[in-house]
Structures are given as structure tokens and as C-alpha cells.
């Protein structure tokens, strides 16, 4: 009998422009577009292989799945899975760590260029007839900013941080970075490492690329925001809880920094009263940095390769919460 494979929340990864067919060779496949947290055990009942993106899989859900042997997280972050409970239960958990590097770095600059040039604002003004009625051949609704010569400060210098740095260098920006491991310095003109506080003080643009941990949670707060230049922009395409959202909203509304753009928030989807949704000069996008078709295709391929490796007896990209000897 073929293995029962369940995909708990397939819609965001594949809204219809990709195919699940490659999974069929491994067993019988059931794909749920979305699974509510309180329905996870029911939808996954009898599954040997479970694929999930964001559906929570805490210990009490895993305990109801005695046949389960494998959880493939279709994504990089795996905080929705109780990995420790899975490991105690003999369930292998894997993730896909590298699929979105180019796409996420691309959105960093899409957001930054919108803050600098306000393309949409000016395009809407033209559509509304403001240029037609203008006495001048050129007009600006708001001040515009050139990136050449500015300092890009990158917090977290892993794959995505380094790709962002390469783009910044191509824009003739100076790059400074902070990371726990300050190794393999890029050969950009003027690149240097800095402490977190130095980076905040000196940067014209601060781009967050840190993982979420006890140390990084709330790293952008009222105290650290006061270190930034009043002309600086903050970009977050990493993890929402890196930012204390009320503190950032207060700083934006007070003109303490010039603007912010965020693709991630502490709660997703956000409640209507999230203060950043109405803050001055704040762009919020709905967690789309990862979601280009190209990145989603790599993600799905990576998840399938992880499953094939597991079934072949040589699992790859395994995440672990306990020492191997436990």
C-alpha cells in the first residue's frame, strides 16, 4: 500500500500555477488549500507523510498522529512545528532553506525604491490629471531620494543579507553589516563590519535579515530607533517580531525616522488596529517577498527533493531540537 501523503496548506505555495503531480509517485496525495489549527489532527489523520507551510503542529496534534513518520516544512522557518515533540515521536522534520534568496532581496529594493521615488504616488497623480493641468513640465509630489553614495546597513549577513548587499553595491551604495559571525567579508569598496548600534547610527537605510530568537526579538524598539538618522529608512523582510510595532509607528508619526517598509508583521494577517497600517510614510506588503513564481517553484521542488531523500534513507535539510544522542 502506498504511503498516505497530506498537504495541509497548499494554496499560498501553489495557487494553481504549479503542479503537485511529482508527489504522486511517492503515495496517495491529499492537498488541502488551508487547514485551521483546530482541524490539523483531523485533516492529517492516518498520514505517514505530512507537508505543511504555516499550519501549527504542536505536540498535542502530533500525539494524535501515531502513523506519522515525516513532516516536510514547505519553507525555511519551522517554528510552527514542535520539533522536539516530533523528534521524541520518531518523526523526521525537514525544511527548505535556500529557495527565496533572490526574490527576497529583490523586494527589499522594490520597497526601498518606492520609499525613495514614490512611483505609485506620482503615477496616480498623472492618472488624476495633475500633470495635464500643471504649468510645469515636471513636478514632484514629495521630495525624492538618490541612493548612490548612501549607506546601506544590513542586520544579519546570511544568504539574503549578502544578496541584498550585492544589489546595494550595484546602486553605488556603501555597505556596512552586523552579524554574529563576521566572516567572509565581501570585496565591496568601503564595506566594513559594525556593531548593531554603530550600524543604526550611520546607516541611511537599515535592512533587517536576522532570524527570530530571544536575542533578536524586539531589536527595533523605541531605544534603538532613537539611534537612527531622522532621514533614514527601515526595511524588514525577515521576521515581524524583530520590530516593536507600536514603537516604530510612534517614531514614524513623530518624524523620528523618514520612512519604513515592511513585508512581515508580528501577526499575519494583521488585526485592523495594527499601528503600522496607519503610520506616516509606512509601506506594508502582505508577506510577498518569497512568493515569485520562480521562488515558489524552487520551494516546491526542494520539498519534493527532501521527501525523496528521506524515503531513500538519506534525509537532507533535517531540523533538530534535541542532541543526536537523545
Image: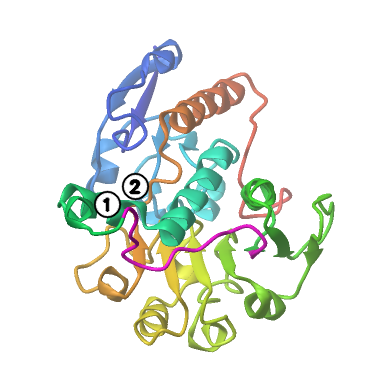
Region rendered in magenta: 137-153
Q: What residue appears at the point 15 percent right and 51 percent down from the top-left corner?
A: 129
Find out whether the residues at labels 2 and 1 contact each other: C-beta distance under 8 Å: yes
Q: Is residue 177 above or below residue 161?
A: below
Predominant SS of the magenta segment: loop
Camera-side residue of 264 and 67: 264
**Dot 1 crowding, Cα within 10 Å, few <14, some 14–19, many 20+:** few
Sequence-earlier tag: 2 or 1: 1
Query: Does the magenta portion include 242?
Result: no
> What secondary structure is marked by label 2?
loop
Whether residue 76 appears in this view of the structure is no
Q: What residue appears at the point 49 percent right and 34 percent down from the top-left corner?
A: 70
> What secondary structure is marked by label 1?
helix
Residue 175 on image: x %, y %: 71, 60
Number of dots carrying numbers = 2
Q: Which mark is residue 153?
A: none
Camera-side residue of 86 and 94: 94
Q: Which mark is residue 37?
A: 1
Query: Does the magenta portion include 145?
Result: yes
Q: CA distance from mark 2 to mark 1?
A: 6 Å
Q: Which residue is mark 2?
A: 55
Residue 190 on image: x %, y %: 81, 61
Which quadrant, please, contains the N terminus?
top left
- The answer to whether residue 190 is left or right of residue 106 is right
Amino acid at each position: 500500500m502506498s504511503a498516505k501523503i497530506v498537504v495541509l496548506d497548499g494554496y499560498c505555495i501553489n495557487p494553481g500555477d504549479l503542479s503537485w503531480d511529482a508527489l504522486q509517485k511517492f503515495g496517495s496525495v491529499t492537498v488541502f488549500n488551508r487547514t485551521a489549527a483546530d482541524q490539523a489532527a483531523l485533516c492529517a489523520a492516518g498520514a505517514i507523510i505530512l507537508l505543511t507551510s504555516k499550519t501549527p503542529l504542536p505536540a498535542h496534534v502530533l500525539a494524535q498522529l501515531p502513523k506519522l513518520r515525516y513532516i516536510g516544512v514547505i519553507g525555511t522557518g519551522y517554528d510552527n512545528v514542535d520539533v522536539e515533540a516530533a523528534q521524541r515521536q520518531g518523526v523526521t522534520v525537514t525544511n527548505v532553506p535556500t529557495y527565496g534568496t533572490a526574490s527576497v532581496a529583490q523586494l527589499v529594493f522594490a520597497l526601498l525604491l518606492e520609499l525613495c521615488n514614490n512611483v505609485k504616488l506620482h503615477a496616480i497623480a498623472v492618472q488624476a490629471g495633475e500633470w495635464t493641468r500643471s504649468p510645469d513640465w515636471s513636478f514632484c509630489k514629495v521630495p525624492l531620494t538618490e541612493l548612490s553614495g548612501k549607506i546601506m546597513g544590513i542586520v544579519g549577513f546570511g544568504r539574503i543579507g549578502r544578496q541584498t548587499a550585492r544589489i546595494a553595491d550595484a546602486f553605488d551604495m556603501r555597505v556596512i553589516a552586523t552579524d554574529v559571525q563576521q566572516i567572509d567579508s565581501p570585496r565591496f569598496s568601503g564595506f566594513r563590519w559594525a556593531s548593531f548600534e554603530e550600524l543604526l547610527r550611520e546607516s541611511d537605510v537599515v535592512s533587517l535579515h536576522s532570524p527570530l530568537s530571544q536575542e533578536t526579538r524586539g531589536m527595533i524598539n523605541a531605544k534603538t530607533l532613537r539611534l537612527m538618522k531622522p532621514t533614514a529608512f527601515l526595511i524588514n523582510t525577515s521576521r515581524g517580531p524583530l520590530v516593536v510595532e507600536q514603537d516604530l509607528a510612534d517614531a514614524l508619526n513623530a518624524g523620528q525616522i523618514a520612512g519604513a517598509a515592511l513585508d512581515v508583521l508580528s501577526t499575519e494577517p494583521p488585526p485592523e488596529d495594527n499601528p503600522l497600517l496607519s503610520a506616516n510614510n509606512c509601506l506594508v506588503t502582505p508577506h510577498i517577498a518569497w512568493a515569485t513564481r520562480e521562488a515558489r517553484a524552487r520551494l516546491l521542488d526542494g520539498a519534493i527533493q527532501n521527501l525523496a531523500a528521506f524515503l531513500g534513507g538519506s534525509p537532507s535539510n533535517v531540523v533538530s531540537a534535541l542532541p543526536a544522542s537523545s
